[in-house]
Image (cartoon, helix red, strand yellow):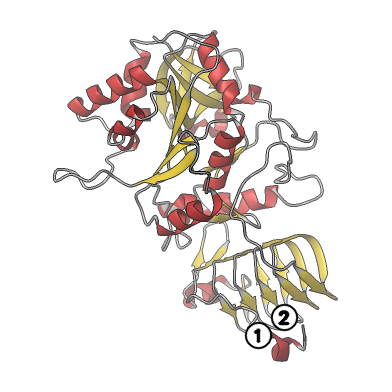
Amino acid sequence: MIERRGRERVMAFVMAGGEGSRLRPLTHERCKPAVPFGSRYRIVDFVLSNLVNSDIRSIYLLVQYKPQSLIEHIRKAYAVSALDSEQFVTVVPPQMTQAQMLFGGTADAVYQSLNLMNQHRPDLVAVFGADHIYRMDVRQMVRFHCENKADASVAAIPVPLDQASGFGIIEADGAGRITGFQEKPARATPMPGDPQRAYASMGNYLFDAGLLRTALEEAHERGETDFGQHVLPRLSQSHRVFAYNFANNVVPGTKPYEEQGYWRDVGTLDAYFDAHQDVLGMVPSFDAFNPQWPIYSSHYQGPTARVMLGELDNVLLGSGTIVKEANIRNSLLRREVVVEPGAQIEDCVIMDFVRVGAGARLRRVIIDRHNRIEPGAQIGYDHDRDRAAGYHVTEGGLVVVPMGDVNYYSREGYRTSAGYSE
């Protein structure tokens, strides 16, 4: 156990190699952390913003599956000055050897990158996932870790017992010390002091640096590759491993109407869609606008959105979007979307560079980038016809249109087809 000095040096590994198979077709051409979210973000922006806002700025992003879109986003959105060697967001691929070409699991990913710790000699190492929508002041977890003289800490979110079977569950005593783990149990052990809820692991960990190195070297020798399945259960039997209650985390600027302790795993298309609904409205469950704890993203400098005679109700518009004489409800349209006259859009997520033709009708649809929806088309009204058109339909009745051929000029031809002159 290291001596506490009051202001611990913390570096971070962010696990950003997720394939996101349950988000297909959105992940056909990109990894899960690179999937767009809201009107201007990517999923990865939330964990990176939490770390940066928490003054943890030595960040390695461990990538694997189809990382190019993520790499380009990081290059544009998180460029930092070369004058400070302790402030960076750096993409790290698998450190390929003849024996192994890819990461074997979360613990193996960090094991392959242990040499990077030598350059910074941190006191603590944060190992966080990149797949969730939330705000978190990580320094509060650091404080909890130090006050409890913990060797490792696991961020835990309380969930109702009837939902616990979908999570990795943490067993802890009254002081928060972890005594065991349950992987998606049929009957979860309640959290201390609350018989109606259980502690679910958020996949965010904090380690003393020396212990992490030793634990990963031992795990490698044993052929163990995962934190949740191997490393942490073993450490909990021999070291001080604590559950940090995320419900106690207070982020500056959170509004009274927001859901306190908001955290969503957007691992399925339906969960991804539902999280978009949470950012809509005058009193959203999760308000993306918080000047005291901003969510950073790419510094896109495009034209402002324009609406001409449109009827919009509960809609977010990205930069450069044009709407004329269309009816749009409960939807998010990202940058440079064009919606032609007479179109009706309801409960949809429309990504960048999409053009919706005149008179088209869309209901409960996610449209990936670079698509042109033909005039008069109807999507979301007849699922058999949607499947026949090659679209993906979820069990919840959500229709997903895969990425189209690359086209960054969705405005092209808009003057004549929409009767609009800039």
Q: Is residue 57 above or below residue 141?
A: below
Q: Please, what is the three-letter code of the amino acid marked with disc 1? A: Pro
Q: Is residue 292 above or below residue 26?
A: above
Disc 2 + disc 1, Cβ < 8 Å: yes
Q: Which residue is mark 1?
A: 375
Quadrant assignment, res 179 = top left
Q: Which residue is mark 2?
A: 340
Q: Earlier in the sequence, mark 2 or mark 1?
A: 2
Q: Which mark is residue 336?
A: none
Q: Is residue 51 left or right of residue 330?
A: left
Residue at 82% across / 49% down in the picture? Answer: 282
Mark 2 → mark 1, Cα distance in angstroms: 8 Å
- Judging depth in this view, the residue of 346 and 123 nearest the camera is 123
Classify 10 Å Cα crowding around label 2: few (below 14), some (14-19), many (20 and above).
many
Quadrant assignment, res 16 = top left
Classify 10 Å Cα crowding around label 1: few (below 14), some (14-19), many (20 and above).
some
Residue at 39% across / 9% down in the picture? Answer: 1
Q: Position of residue 127 (x, y in %)?
A: 43, 31
Q: Position of residue 266 (x, y in %)?
A: 54, 47
Q: Please, what is the three-letter code of the amino acid marked with disc 2? A: Glu
Regarding residue 190, the answer to whether it shows in the image is no
